[in-house]
Structures are given as structure tokens and as C-alpha cells.
Amino acid sequence: MPSPSSTPDVMEKLVSLCKRRGFIFQSSEIYGGAGSVWDYGPLGVELKRNIKERWWNSMIRARSDIEGLDAAILMHPKVWEASGHVSGFVDPLVDCRNCKKRFRADDPRIKGTPGTPDAQCPACGMKATLSAARQFNLMFKTFMGPVEDSAAVVYLRPETAQGIYVNFLNVQQSTRQKVPFGIAQIGKAFRNEITPGNFIFRTREFEQMEMQFFVEPGTDVTWFEYWKAQRMDWHRSLGLAESRLRFHEHTKEELAHYARAAFDVQFDFGGTLGFQEIEGVHNRGDFDLSQHQTFSGKKLEYFDQPANKRYLPFVVETSVGADRTALAVLVNGYREETVEGESEGRTVLGLHPSIAPIKAGVFPLVKKDGMPEMAHRIADDLRSRMPVFYDDSGAIGRRYRRQDEVGTPFCITVDGESITAGTVTVRDRDTLRQERVDAARLGELLGEKLRS
Ligand code: ATP
């Protein structure tokens, strides 16, 4: 449900910037677009990769107690019976007989009770045309193999977690990890959402970054608190403003029947969207492993050798959307400001340097006197360490603006003094301060700035 906020709504401007500058395009746009599916352009794919890399590094590479996995999207259909998705992954849906549009039954725009004469369609405005609510499963179905019959139905996974549960013992035994330990993966998930929207906030195809941490029952509460704190820190480390982040504890009504506790990390997207979930941290007990044990008939217990006992571990899960995080950092970073002494203002994407798609713009002040050659040399040299963009077209102020708008943290300009003294200016996107540095030290200097 929306939770309106006093933070301004920048979504419309952001959608337009993202298209114009090659971050995000509507899927199949030349055919009129595919509903709530988006393509990442040259800058968007870099941004999302950087976010995923930061997650992968902090969750797997920097730790010895979490292993990585890349499980397949298609799984045995029984997986989804065991997980509860076949019977329970449903939203109540109503149809309008007049305009043929579909809505979630709890859509706040619907007046009256669907299925009764007083109900009014929020799209066409007709009364008495809305059907009574019926349950609609959000999983996409397809067929495995050449026969399209009911025996061949498989699903596109609606979450990545199940690939982790079914591989719990494979990973544990092949790596000889001891509980407590985790398994993490990044991958696509698909949900046939009834009311998708708000750009990449809710889409039908998206990427999740999920980690399941297996712990001894009785230690789950401590680990749950640990992971809550860790995950909030990670969001802060992306540069998301403290004032825009908060926890939301699931109420009894929101809590899944098997869940022992659940907290969402929420981010304030501004405007009518307001605070919304970007990540879920869940204490799932042994629900998932015990379901798979029952449905598969295979024991999934962990053998604790020193204690000489077997048990089903409890799971603390952290589940975050890569696309939703990308939207959060874009919304968080977007700002329009006036520049002292200049008539034209500027639009800035204040992205954390580590996730900015381009790390440095390299410009010759003018296209003569050896400046383009030197600037090309610098750009080629830096390119082996970081994504850079060479630009010699238009006034220098324009070139700075173009980089500000896509979040490039540093701009390097080669001028007359560069040719004689071997120095260049480095302009900081946020402070607008320029420092003159030795061109030979640029790689080292930018490397330091990007790490800090
Ligand atoms: P919501 O209540 O917003 O539908 P959820 O509680 O169903 O989300 P989870 O199943 O916990 O979400 O999924 C974990 C994360 O995956 C979410 O926090 C979100 O970042 C991301 N996610 C879930 N559904 C979508 C979607 N349709 N589009 C984009 N990201 C999504």
C-alpha cells in the first residue's frame, strides 16, 4: 500500500532521463512496449552490474561462511508445490466486463465491493461491471519438452530462494561448510503481477539477490538481528540517505504462517509511492527444508559431528531486488540545482562513485594544440582500470553537465598548461572543486578516490 511522503516525486523526470541517456528503455518499445518489462541500456547495465557486484563482494567474496550458487530458472514442478507457491502465491483479481481491464481486488481506486452492482471500475467508470474477486496465481507457466499438455507444465521461478534450498546438502557437502553458513545467488525471477508499475519498482521480470543463512535452531533470533543490521549497513554503503531508510516489521496479518519474524528494509521513493520495501529479512524457521524433505522423500538434515546430532537447520533469509535497488539509488541521487555564476542550472545523479556507470569523463579544452591527442592518451590509459568517456564536442560547461546528469564522479580536462607542465584538472561532480594534478598520477589518484 502506498505510504505518501513529503520527499518530492522525481519519477517522471527520472524515467525520461533514463531513456534519453541510455539507462533504461521500455521492452519492445517499437511494438508499443511489453507490459512492465524493461531493458537496461549501456549505462543502466553498468549501474546494475555494479550494484550486483557490491552485493556479491560483500556477501560472498569478503566472507568465508557464505557460498555462491547459480541455480537454473526452470525447476521440477514439485518444488513449487513444496514451497507453497502453487496453492498460495496468489492475488485476488477482479475483471471489468466492459473495458476488459484487470485490477487487484484491494486496489484503493475501486469504489464499492467488486461483484456487487455498486462497484465502479476505476478505468472506464462503469458501474456493476466488476466481477467478484477470484484468486490469480502469479507464476508464469510454460511447458518442458515437446508436448504441451498438463503433465509438461513447469514454472518460471517467482524467486531464486528455492534453488538454494534444494541444493542445501549439495553445497554443504561439497564445500564442507559447517552450520552456521549461507548460500547466496543472484538471478532472474518472474511474477505475473496484476498491477505492476512505477517504472522498475514492480516488474514482471526482475533480478533478485538472495541469501539463505542456515543456523542451528535456537540461534536464529541472534542471527536474524545480525543480518538485519548487516543489510541496513549495506544499503547505507550505497549512499542511500539515512532519512530515506527505515525498517518495517511485518504485522501478524502480513507475516507468512511459517515465518517467525520478518522485517522489510524500506526506502522512501518520494511522492505518492513513499516508503516501500526494497529488501526483506525473514526468519523462516525450518519450513522450507522440511517441506522439501517431505515432498522429495529425501532427508535434508545436517549432521553436526562434534555434537553427534542431526537436525534441520533454521533459515534466516535476506532477499533484495537488484532492479528496485537500482531505482532507489537513482531516486536518491537525482537532484536539480542552480550553479553560482551560471544562468543554466544542472541536473545531477549523485551516485556513489563505486556504482556510477562512468567513473571519469576526459575532455580536451579545445580541439587543437595537441590537447585531443593528450586527452586520448589519458582516456586510453585509464580505460584499462575503469570505464571512462572521452568527449570533445561542445563547450566545456556542456560536457560537464552531460557527465553530471549520468552521475560521473570525476571530469578530467586537458588544457594549455597540460601540454607544457603535464598536469590536468580533476573536477569533482558534487563539490565542483577542481584540483590540478600530475597527469602521470591520474590512475593512482582516481583509484584512491573511488576506493574511499
Ligand atoms: P512486494 O510486497 O513489493 O510485492 P514481496 O514482499 O512480494 O514484495 P519478496 O518476495 O520478499 O517481495 O521479494 C524480495 C525482493 O524482491 C523485494 O524486496 C523486491 O526488492 C524484489 N521484488 C519482488 N517483487 C518484485 C517485482 N515484481 N519487481 C521488482 N522487484 C521485485
Image (tube, rainbow, N blue to C red):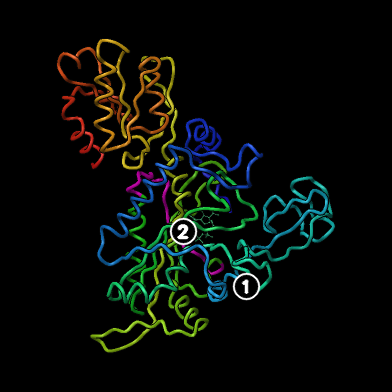
Quarter-of-image position of residue 285: bottom left
Which label lies toward us, 1 or 2?
1
Residue type at mark 2: give it: His
- Is residue 241 on the magenta stretch? yes
- For residue 408, the mark is none
Query: Relative to 273, is 129 above or below?
Result: below
Give me the residue at 24% from left, 42% from top.
451
Give me the residue at 18% from left, 35% from top.
444
- Is residue 281 on the magenta stretch? no
* Left or right side of 205 for 43: left
Name the secondary structure under disc 1: helix
CB of mark 1 within 8 Å of CB of mark 2? no
Q: Which of the two residues, 436 or 373, is positioned nearer the viewer here?
A: 373
Residue 246 in the image, given as x and y percentages of width and height: 42, 53
Quarter-of-image position of residue 397: top left
Q: Which of the two residues, 136 or 239, is positioned nearer the viewer here?
A: 136
Residue receiving disc 2: 248
Residue at the front extreme? Answer: 146
Residue 206 in the image, given as x and y percentages of width and height: 51, 53
Residue type at mark 1: give it: Ser
Q: Which residues are magenta?
A: 236-253
Query: Relative to 21, is 184 above or below?
Result: below
Residue receiving disc 1: 87
Q: Which of the two residues, 5 or 52, is positioned nearer the viewer here?
A: 52
